[in-house]
Structures are given as C-alpha cells and as structure tokens.
Image (cartoon, helix red, strand yellow):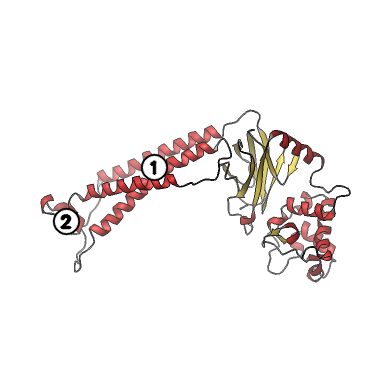
Amino acid sequence: MNRLARALSTPEEQRPAHQKHPLARMLLIGLAASVIGVLICLQIDWFPTQGSTQADQIDTLYDVLLIVSVPIFVLVMTVAIYCVIAFRAKPGERGDGAHIHGNTKLEVIWVTIPFIIVTALAIYGWIVLDDIEAKQEQELVVNVTGEQFTWTFDYPGEKVKSNELVLPVDRPVHFKIHAKDVLHSFWVPVFRMKQDAVPGIETNTRVTPNELGSFPLVCAELCGIGHATMRQEVRVVPEDEWEAWVAERREGGAAPEEGEDPIAAGRQIFTSTGCNACHTLDDADATSAVGPDLNQLAAVAEDRAPRANAEEYVRESIVDPPAFVVDGYSGDTMPGNYGDQLTPEEIDTLVEYLLGLSQTGKGE
Ligand code: CUA
C-alpha cells in the first residue's frame, strides 16, 4: 500500500504531523502559490505599445486568460511536487502502491470544471473578436499580398500599389489578405491583430491605427528559408500626410523619373521590390543570405553564365530565376513573377544598378 493511501486510511490522530489533512494542505499551498503566480504574471509587461483601438480589449483578454490559467498550472504543479515529497518511498520500502481503479465523482468533477472554464473563455473571446472586427464606416480598404519573402499593398480605392504600408491615423482599415505561394501570416504586433494569408482564398482583418509612428510588420507563419527576413514597416501618419503620399504614388510610382540618379533609382527599386529581403548588397544596406550575395555581381556574372553576357545573365536571373542557379542555392526559392511585377524600364534600371555598382566599385 502506498503512503498516500496509508496516510488517508490511518486515523487522523495516529498520523505523523506532516500527513495530517494532506488534501487540505496541498490545496492551501496551491492557493497561496497561485496568488503569487498571478501577481508575478500581471507585473510582466507582455506587449509592445498599443497602436490601435483594438489593442486594449486584446490586452484585457490576455490578462483574463492569464488569471485563469496560472492558478491551474500552479495547482497542478503544487499537487505533483507535494506528493513527490510527502509520499516518497522510505529507504527499504519496496511494496507496490495501492491499486486504485476509477473514481466516478472525481472524474465528473475534472471533466465538468474544465469544460465550463474553456467554454466560458471561448464565448468571451468570440464576443471580443466580434466587437473589434465589426465593419465600420469610412473604411480604407487595403489588399495585402504575401509572397516569399515580401509583402505588397494595393489601395484599390486610391488606385495605388506600394511595397510600403502607409496608413492614416484614426481611420478604420479593412485588410483583405492574399498569398501568392504558401501560407504566410500578416501581423503588426502594435495593432495586436494577426491573420493568416492563405493561397486561393481571401482572409480579412480590421484595425483602426491610433498611434503615429513606424512599427514592425512581420510574417508570423514559417513560410520558407527567408521567413525571418519577411519583415517590413508600417508607417502611421496624419491624414493629410497620407493623402500627399497617395497623390505622389499615383503620379510617380516606383518607376525612375527622367534625370534621376540611376544608382538611387536602382536602389529604390531593389528595396521596394523586396530584393533586400533575400540578398546581400552593401549599397542598399541589404544583409540577408537567403539568395546569393550581389556585391561584385559584374565580376562573377561572366563565369556563372558561360552562354550569356553579364547583362543577359542578370536580367534572366530576375525574370526567370531557375535559368541560372548559383552553386549552393535553389532555383525555386525566388518568386518567378518579377517579370510581371516590374515594368521593362524598371528591370533595365535594376540590371544597370546591379552591374554598375560592382563595375564602379561602389558596391565594395
Ligand atoms: Cu512569410 Cu513567414
């Protein structure tokens, strides 16, 4: 017979001091530890600043989940640790423990209580989500597209496409989210809202930014070798600044203008198209190693592509990545749609930029 069973079957007054009311003692220690655990958890600053009107309710929801789950964790651990210590076998004790088979009352309790807790939390979460994702008036619609390994944004009402997410402050935004290749997840931590980007369907989320500034926008779904580099920024600006940005994008876009410095124009395309998410290029402050290093590209281009000249090699590598594959890299990591995304002029500018840098030594 094990020690717990023996302790419980021995009359109260005959038990040693530490075995008196073992259940009450465990619960009391568990209760004290739960209170301490909850207090510690509520002291921790779990989140970045609140950047949307949705953030406050999400943070409250999280605190409620903490308050409910910490005591359960602490209680379970306390009972387990208490039993290990109080009822451990004495030296020389070799017998089996008592064979206990089923306890209907206990089983009904430990199924019913968790069922009530989980159901109540699910209803609470549903009510919060339903409230903060409700359709609003004057919504700004933004189509978000995720692909390996960059985000692009399309403002259909404004007829503007951009590789940068710029939002007016205090205006509700309805994000319609798409994916070109694999699963991604659109997440701006300061907004608190996160939504999967799924190929073939449109997912939605709504946010009203209420804090000016630049905040990280990250991909929160493991989507391939460049997942960790799939980070951009969202800029929340005053309404008039946003309108000026829209007007500027509508006229100029990412295409280089007459008389513009070709290096600056090339760098702009390189960065706004997301090349910097995967390649290293000193001139553009790009340091990722998902794809080949592009410093000194002109010098190695000839060797890498014996059947093409340097310019053909670079152009081909942009529009049809599997055409030439550098040793140690895969031909299907890079998206194959840059030929559609970029205008012929933009591709010219990009090719000139990549080759020009290394020929003039500016890429060193
Ligand atoms: Cu896209 Cu991770």
Callout 1: 10 Å neighbours few (<14), some, many (20+)?
some
Locate residue 272, reporting x and y percent: 74, 50
Element type where label 1 sits in the image: helix
Residue at x 33% of width, y 41% of height: 113
129 versus 46 height, above or below: above
Locate residue 127, reporting x and y percent: 48, 33
Residue 330 appearing in the image: yes
Circles 1 and 2 in contact, beta carbons < 8 Å: no
Quadrant assignment for the N terminus: bottom left
Locate residue 64, reporting x and y percent: 43, 40
Q: Please indicate whether residue 152 sits to the left or right of residue 300 in the image.
A: left
Name the residue tied to disc 2: 6
Residue 156 appearing in the image: no
Name the residue tied to disc 1: 68
Which one is in front, 255 or 203?
255
Q: Earlier in the sequence, mark 1 or mark 2?
A: 2
Res. 204 mark:
none
Element type where label 2 sits in the image: helix
